[in-house]
Amino acid sequence: MTKKELNDLLNKGKWENISIAKYESIKNKIDIENATTDAVLDAMSVIYEIPKEDLLNLDIKTFNCLLTQVNNLKNFNANKLKKTYSINGTNYSIGLKYNVLRGEFDITTDQYITFMNVLRENSECLPSILATILIPNGQRFNNGYDLLQLKENINRHMSILDGASIVFFLNSLFLALLNKHSVK
């Protein structure tokens, strides 16, 4: 394997290049210390898009390099919020803004109802949550674009790092609001 081929493989194994869908299929398999050999090979096969048989035929140095990277995936740092997210060729911004002066969110009723329904019915589904938060630049929530298609695009094309960073931001924002408005 050439150095370029190895670098291309290693690039696939970076958090910013692992989609939410890919993460969902490997999340229980990347804990190398507690996972079975088959589970780790399954995860590596998904991450690097290489059949398990081909992984087993790699030279040991290359395999160890890939395995080390997978082992390092447990060190997840989701705290880099971006102004714009490009998903499958379309730019999106976080469409949930907090107005400090009024002490409330600037969102539409439709967005609020959809967001609350998603949290109530499917709080574990990251793409559903993000589809209520991310809005195509220059558009309003659920107006001029297909919400279900956005959810699918988020799932397949948004990195888990970006998705988790947005949820981390929302969680921090909601905790701050709860602390601000709690009875003391």
Image (tube, rainbow, N blue to C red):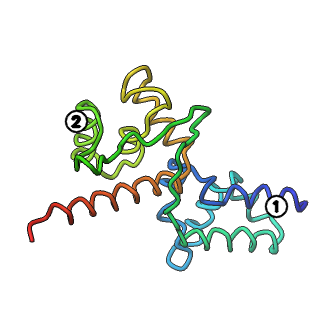
* Residue at 60% in and 59% down: 15
Secondary structure beneath label 2 = helix
Percent coordinates x, y for residue 183 in the rendering: 8, 66
* Residue 83 versus residue 149 in the image, above or below: below
Q: Residue at x 54, y 68 (%)?
A: 30
- Label whose residue precedes the other's in the sequence (1 or 2): 1
Q: Position of residue 165 (x, y in %)?
A: 47, 57
In the displayed structure, would residue 137 be above or below residue 70? Answer: above
Extreme residue toward the left, this view: 183
Say which mark, if any, is on residue 6: 1
> In the picture, which quadrant includes the N terminus?
bottom right
Viewer-proximal residue among 35 and 168: 168
65 sits left or right of 114 in the view: right
Q: Amino acid at mark 1?
A: Leu
The structure residue drawn at horizontal position 40% and vertical position 49%, both measured from the top left corner, is 126
Q: Residue at x 30, y 46 (%)?
A: 99
In front of the other: 26 or 108: 108
Q: Residues within 10 Å of mark 2 (few under 14, many from 20)?
A: few
Q: Which residue is mark 2?
A: 113
Q: Residue furthest top?
A: 144
Mark 1–mark 2 distance (CA, rounded to whole Å):
47 Å
Closer to us: mark 1 or mark 2?
2
Residue 122 position within the rendered picture, expressed as x and y whole percent measured from the top left? 28, 46
Position of 163 with respect to 50 (left or right) is left
Amino acid at dot 2:
Ile
Residue 59, label in figure:
none
What secondary structure is marked by label 1? helix
